[in-house]
Amino acid sequence: MIKKISIGIIVISVLSFWQRDLSGQTFNNNDRTIYLMRAKGFYGSGAKMNLMINGELIHAIKNGSRLIIKTNTSDTLNIQIVYPPIKRYKSEVLQILPESGNDVYLDLFYWGEGYNPLKHSGVIIGPTGGTPEFNIEIVELDKNEGKQKFNDSPSFKDNKIIIEKRYP
């Protein structure tokens, strides 16, 4: 009985010392972190925003959610937001260059006016009416302002569950 216990202790100690390379995590200086946030709001709340990086769909961002993307600092990224129901509504392309730094904070939002049936059907303006002014934007924030806005939990509906993705 004592022989079985001592053999078990020897086996466990040998196996634990054998796994020495798993003892810590290494930090890679070539990593860039992009923090994307879309604060909750009424205007445009029903629609998702399609996040495109270098022309490739990465994620559909819901109203009131946050997203962290890990990428390499040597990559030049062209980021654009597309409104899925009407593809012609796109943000300007935001280019993140290799010298932009390790932490980049981006704010995504809609701007414009809501649909007013009296105005846009032609009752108030005239027989032709019109279409509401509408577009989506992506804005790069400075580090302090971005960190403060990203950590402001009441502005988001994601209940502190932040999605994290890796972009090749």
Image (cartoon, helix red, strand yellow):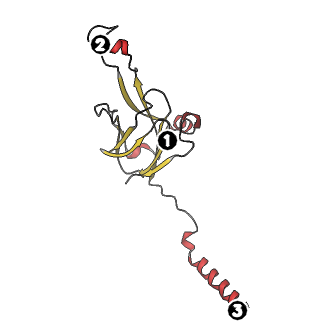
Please tell me which residue is depicted at 44% across the width and 38% down the height of the picture. 62
Callout 3 environment at 10 Å: few (<14), some (14 to 19), or many (20+)?
few
Q: Amino acid at mark 1?
A: Arg
The C terminus lies in which quarter of the figure? bottom left
Please tell me which residue is depicted at 44% across the width and 54% down the height of the picture. 30
The residue at which mark 1 appears reads as 66
Q: CA distance from mark 3 to mark 1?
A: 56 Å
Q: CA distance from mark 2 to mark 3?
A: 92 Å
As helix, strand or loop, the secondary structure at mark 2 comes to: loop
Please tell me which residue is depicted at 73% across the width and 90% down the height of the picture. 2
Q: Is residue 111 left or right of residue 16?
A: left
x and y, in percent, of residue 112 in the image = 39, 22
Q: Is residue 129 left or right of residue 115?
A: left
The residue at which mark 2 appears reads as 129
The residue at which mark 3 appears reads as 3
x and y, in percent, of residue 48 in the image = 40, 37
Q: Nearer the viewer, residue 148 or 66?
A: 66
**From what the image shows, is residue 149 above or below residue 12?**
above
The N terminus lies in which quarter of the figure? bottom right
Mark 2 or mark 1, whichever is nearer to me: 2
Q: CA distance from mark 2 to mark 1?
A: 37 Å
Q: Earlier in the sequence, mark 3 or mark 1?
A: 3
The total of numbered circles placed on residues is 3
Callout 2 environment at 10 Å: few (<14), some (14 to 19), or many (20+)?
some
Q: Quadrant of residue 15?
A: bottom right
As helix, strand or loop, the secondary structure at mark 3 comes to: helix
As helix, strand or loop, the secondary structure at mark 1 comes to: strand
